[in-house]
Image: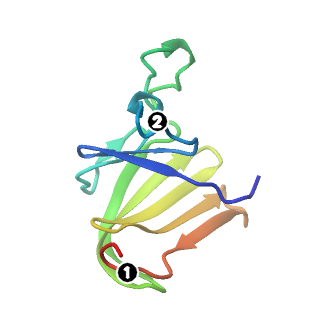
């Protein structure tokens, strides 16, 4: 649709799950959510964001995502945004038939930049962190 959408994150131990569907905080079921990050990150680490729904395994996504959807930590280093320079970012690649999503993730902050390149065309997106305030208000 091209419209921004809300994403919800659930942290369970060292795993961060995401969903674009509204969540009921009293009854969160992580077995139906995408595994956004499997911490701790390290160069070369890979994980599949799709999981089998134990309640409906026949209609669950394909678990072998080596051909599409696999997330891989490609590199570790600094990344510059309008919000400043963030040292020690993890560059995470997610590869699809239509192109690839790359995210730069900083421990303690989250995603500082992301981009999607649509199979070599001019279509896609680029997002960068424009401001950041440490701690909560």
133 or 26, nearer to the observer:
26
- The residue indicated by pointer 2 is 33
Q: Residue at x 22, y 52 (%)?
A: 40
Residue 101 location in percent, x, y?
A: 53, 56
Instruction: Mark 1 vs mark 2: give the one in front.
Output: 1
* Nearer to us in this view, 82 or 135: 135
Quadrant occupied by the C terminus: bottom left
Q: Is residue 17 above or below residue 40?
A: above
Identify the residue at image location x=46%, y=21%. Answer: 53
- Give the camera-side residue of 4 and 119: 4
Q: Residue at x 30, y 74 (%)?
A: 135
**Percent coordinates x, y for residue 110 in the rendering:** 37, 64
Position in image of residue 3 (x %, y %): 73, 58
Asked if marks 1 and 2 touch (Cβ < 8 Å), the reply is: no
123, above or below 40, in the image: below
Closest to the observer, 117 or 36: 36
- Residue 133's mark? 1
* First-in-chain label (1 vs 2): 2
Q: Residue at x 34, y 68 (%)?
A: 109
Q: Is residue 66 above or below residue 1?
A: above
- The answer for how far apart the CA atoms under marks 1 and 2 are is 28 Å
């Amino acid at each position: 649709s091209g419209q921004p959408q809300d994403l919800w994150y659930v942290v369970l131990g060292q795993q961060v799950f995401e969903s674009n569907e509204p969540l009921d905080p009293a009854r969160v079921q992580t077995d139906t959510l995408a595994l956004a990050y499997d911490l701790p990150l390290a160069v070369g680490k890979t994980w599949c964001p799709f999981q089998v729904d134990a309640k409906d395994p026949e209609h669950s996504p394909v678990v072998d995502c080596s051909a599409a959807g696999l997330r891989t930590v490609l590199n570790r280093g600094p990344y510059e945004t309008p919000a400043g320079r963030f040292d020690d970012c993890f560059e995470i690649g997610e590869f699809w038939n239509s192109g690839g999503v790359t995210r730069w993730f900083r421990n303690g902050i989250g995603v500082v930049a992301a981009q999607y390149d649509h199979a070599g065309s001019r279509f896609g997106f680029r997002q960068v962190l424009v401001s950041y305030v440490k701690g909560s208000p």
